[in-house]
Structures are given as C-alpha cells and as structure tokens.
C-alpha cells in the first residue's frame, strides 16, 4: 500500500490538501492549508437559491483551496474530469495500482458510510483514495475519525452525481511538490488576499458588509408577519447549518482561520499575528453565540427577536473588522 | 472557543461519529478536538430533516390517494427535487411532472423507468409500486 496516513480534519478540501501535501513530503497542518489559500470569506447571495433559501457561505467557493495552495506553495496539481463514468473509474484504478494517492470530488449523498442525517445532495465534497481491495476502495475521508471503505458502484455514483457543482468525476493529485515554502513571504501575501476579500469586495453581500446585511435582512423579515412566522425560522436554521454543520471547524471557519494565524505567529515570531488570532477567536465565539440564540428562536424555545440577532451579527462584524485591521499591518 | 467549552452533546445526527473542531488550550494555542455534537447544530439539522420527512409523509399520502405517482414519493425519498431529478435522469422537468400523474406513470415503459432507476438508485420493480408506509 501507499503508506498514506489518515488525519481527521474539520473541512474536507483543506483536509485533503493538507494530507496530500504532507504525504508528498511537505508537512502541513489543515489550518495552514486553509489560511495559505486565503479561503476565509462571507457571502450572502440572495439570487442563488438552495431549496428556496439564499446561498450563504463562510468560505471561498469549492476548489479555491486547491487553487490557492498552488499559488502560494508552488505545488502543481494535475486535474482530470471524465465524460464517461466507467472510464473515470478505470482511470482511478490505474493510478491506484501505481501506488499513488488521489483526491476526488464527490457528492455526499451517495457515500454509504455517511450517517443518514448528514446525507444531502451536496456535490463538492472531497476525499482521498489511497488504495483498493477487491470491490472496495480504501478512503481517507477527512471529516471522519478513521479511514473508511466504499464499494465501486457507490463511489461511481458519488463521483458522477449530477446537479449544482457536479464533480464530473474530478480526480486530482500533486504533480510537483516543493520541498519547502517561503512562509515569511507567502503568509503575509495570503493574508493580504484574504483581507481584500473580507473588507474590499465590490459587492455589498460579500465580506464584512455581507454580515451586516444579513442582520438587516433578519430585521426586514421580522417586520413582515407572514415571513416572520414561516420563513424566518427556516432561514435561521439554514444559516446555522451553513455555519456549523458543513464541516467548518466551528463558527463558520473562523476558528480554523484563527488557528492559522496563531500557527503563523509562531513561525514568523509576530506579536501582531498573535493578537489578530485572539481577535479572530473572539469573532468566532460571537458567531457561536449567534448560532446558539438563532437555533433557539428557530425552534421556538426563545421568542423571535431579530433585533437581538442583528446586534450579535454586528458584533461579529465589528470583531472581524478589528482582526482585519491588525492584519492589514502585516508586511 | 476554549477546550472545555467544546460541546459534547451526543447529536443523533452524527450517527455515533465525532467531528473535529478547533479550540484553544490554556496557553491560547489552537488544537483540534473531537466533538460528539452541539445542540445548536442539531436543532438546525433536525429542522431541515423534519421538513424533508413531513414532505415525504405528505406525498406518500397523496400517492396513496392516487393524486400523484410513486415517482414523486421516491424522488423526495431520495431528497431530490424536480430540477435535480431532471439533471440526474436527463428527462425534462415538464415530462417528470407529467409522470407524477398516476395514469401516465402506470403506463411508462421499462426503458424510461430504467432511467429513473439509475438516477434514484432504486430498481424498476420498486419504482412501480408505492412502499407500504412512508
């Protein structure tokens, strides 16, 4: 076998990339992979609907981490998609038989090892295949505690599921991995990219402005009696799911990013980075507070109070502003 | 979030698994910790699951009364909507909606059912009949 070591991660894409790079001789933690790819974000996109609810994302779109890491570490990835599912599976077998490990993009729904309560039609899941045995593929799914197995038919269905963000069997592996990364140069560069996304996006629904806008939206929904009763609780549940359920490491990736800042502060011996890590942690804690109160209102255990939620969201925004302000001084 | 604040609420939606979250230790260093679940997250997941279940039960009853076909039931059973089923099966949405009419559905040839069978991961024999209970 390939000697691949499974490591549990909070998020699938950063987990897969951190593991693949580590396997190929460039040890990297998950938060470092996440931070170096400048993957933190906030977006509330009202005109893209997921079963009737607006798209809310706390990170950059799928594949942004893979692409971001190519930019910052100099790793070169080889990508392959397939029109024909059988050929996609054959290609996977070929590389596995060469002893290589591969990253795959798949749907969550068709993976049999996922618990029932987590199986939704989400097509941008990532996992590593590190071998095969008989009809089973040996899989390191980064969000699981230990390696898992999946039969050929199910894996094929998961890889070739159609719909939004369809993977088309996407298979990727490193072609060239550098021996080291110039952290002193790449960490500040990645932070600058991320600062721009969060504070200087040209659209009002992205970054800090997006967070405040979400609060405004809750107030507006509460004023409409029909929306307040049916849609608002549903919407709150949706926000909390996007923030906590979808492998974010807690608080919509804020804790992962804070972990990256903290790790960077040690690497670069920077007090400012350490301070920014603390500020980001506080923002994360505030997001957790939001989830707690919103979920109670969603279930009717607490009276609906959009003003309170709006206040908490503004608190999240303020704390993030502080963190990005400190970070804008990083050279 | 500090280490001892990491919730361990044994969420049933995790199916016995544990997720990794990041939290700070006494020195403020970040470490990955496993969590068995958090109540706030469980509430949110449950409300989404409840909605699916409600929808499933409703459509099952309509199918039972002959107001829709078993196809619509199996579609929601697989947590899909018409748009997704259309993309997955390659059958136009208006055609799928037409197949929700029991009279049309009961006369569908195997060739078409085969396409639904592949899209939904259920065999043709299952698709023909409505399950006994939702």
Image: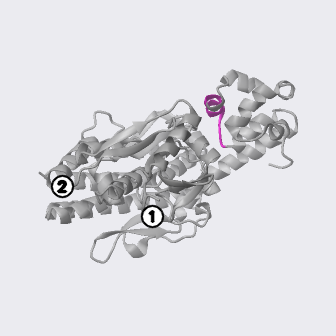
Provide the major secondary structure of the magenta segment: helix
Q: Visible in this render: residue A141?
A: yes
**Residue B81 drawn in magenta:** yes
* Residue A111 percent location from the top left of the image: 60, 50
Mark 1 — on which chain does it sit? B
Q: Which mark is residue A183?
A: 2
For disc 1, the marked residue is B20
- In which image quadrant can residue A51 be found? top right
Where residue A288 appears, as percent x and y from the top left, is 42, 61
Name the residue rendered at 59%, 36% in the picture: A86
Q: Position of residue B21 (x, y in %)?
A: 42, 64
Q: Which mark is residue A68?
A: none
Viewer-proximal residue among A39 and A13: A13
Q: Residue at x 54, y 40 (%)?
A: A90
Q: Image check: B100 left or right of A158?
A: right
In screen coordinates, is A2 left or right of A156?
A: left
Q: Which residues are magenta?
A: B79-87
Residue displayed at 87% across by 40% down? B64
Q: Where is A298 relative to A82, above or below? A: below
Residue B23, placed above or below residue B120: below
Residue density around tag 1, few if under 14, some if 14–19, many if 20 or more, within 10 Å: many
Q: Between residues A245 and B117, which one lies in front from this camera angle?
A: B117
User: Is A313 located above or below residue A144 in the figure?
Assistant: above
Q: Nearer the viewer, residue A158 or A78?
A: A78
- Whether residue A292 appears in magenta in the rendering, the answer is no
Q: Quadrant of residue B79?
A: top right
Counting other residues with Cα less than 10 Å from the Cα at mark 2, is it few (<14), some (14-19), or many (20 or more)?
some
Q: Which chain contains the residue that carries disc 2?
A: A
């Amino acid at each position: 076998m390939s000697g691949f070591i499974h490591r549990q991660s909070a998020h699938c894409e950063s987990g897969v990339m951190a593991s693949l790079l580590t396997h190929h001789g460039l040890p990297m933690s998950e938060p470092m992979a996440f931070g170096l790819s400048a993957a933190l974000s906030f977006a509330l996109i009202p005109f893209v609907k997921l079963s009737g609810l607006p798209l809310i994302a706390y990170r950059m779109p799928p594949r942004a981490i893979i692409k971001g890491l190519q930019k910052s570490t100099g790793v070169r990835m080889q990508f392959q998609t397939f029109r024909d599912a059988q050929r996609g599976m054959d290609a996977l077998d070929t590389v596995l038989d060469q002893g290589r490990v591969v990253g795959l993009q798949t749907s969550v729904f068709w993976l049999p090892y996922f618990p029932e309560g987590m199986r939704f039609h989400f097509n941008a899941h990532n996992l590593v295949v590190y071998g095969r045995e008989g009809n089973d593929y040996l899989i390191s799914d980064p969000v699981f505690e230990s390696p898992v197995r999946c039969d050929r038919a199910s894996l094929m269905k998961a890889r070739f599921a159609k719909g939004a963000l369809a993977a088309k069997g996407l298979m990727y592996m490193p072609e060239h991995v550098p021996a080291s990364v110039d952290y002193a140069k790449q960490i500040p560069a990645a932070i600058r990219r991320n600062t721009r996304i969060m504070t200087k996006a040209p659209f009002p629904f992205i970054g800090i402005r997006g967070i405040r806008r979400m609060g405004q939206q809750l107030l507006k929904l509460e004023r409409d009696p029909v929306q307040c009763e049916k849609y608002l609780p549903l919407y709150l549940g949706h926000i909390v799911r996007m923030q906590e359920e979808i492998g974010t490491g807690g608080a919509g990736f804020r804790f992962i990013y804070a972990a990256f800042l903290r790790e960077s502060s040690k690497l670069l011996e920077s007090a400012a980075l350490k301070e920014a890590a603390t500020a980001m942690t506080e923002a994360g804690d505030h997001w957790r507070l939001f989830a707690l109160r919103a979920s109670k209102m969603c279930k009717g255990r607490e009276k609906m109070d959009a003003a309170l939620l709006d206040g908490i969201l503004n608190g999240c925004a303020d704390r993030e502003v502080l963190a990005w302000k400190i970070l804008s001084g990083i050279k | 979030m500090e280490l001892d604040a990491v919730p361990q609420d044994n969420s049933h939606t995790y199916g016995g698994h544990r997720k990794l979250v990041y939290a700070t230790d006494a020195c403020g260093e970040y470490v990955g910790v496993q969590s068995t679940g958090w109540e706030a997250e469980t509430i949110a997941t449950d409300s989404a699951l409840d909605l699916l279940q409600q929808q499933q039960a409703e459509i099952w009853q309509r199918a039972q009364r002959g107001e829709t076909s078993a196809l619509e039931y199996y579609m929601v059973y697989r947590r899909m909507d018409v748009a997704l089923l259309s993309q997955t099966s390659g059958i136009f949405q208006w055609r799928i909606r037409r197949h929700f009419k029991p009279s049309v559905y009961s006369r569908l040839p195997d060739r078409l059912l085969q396409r639904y069978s592949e899209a939904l991961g259920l065999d043709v024999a299952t698709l023909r009949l409505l399950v006994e209970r939702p």
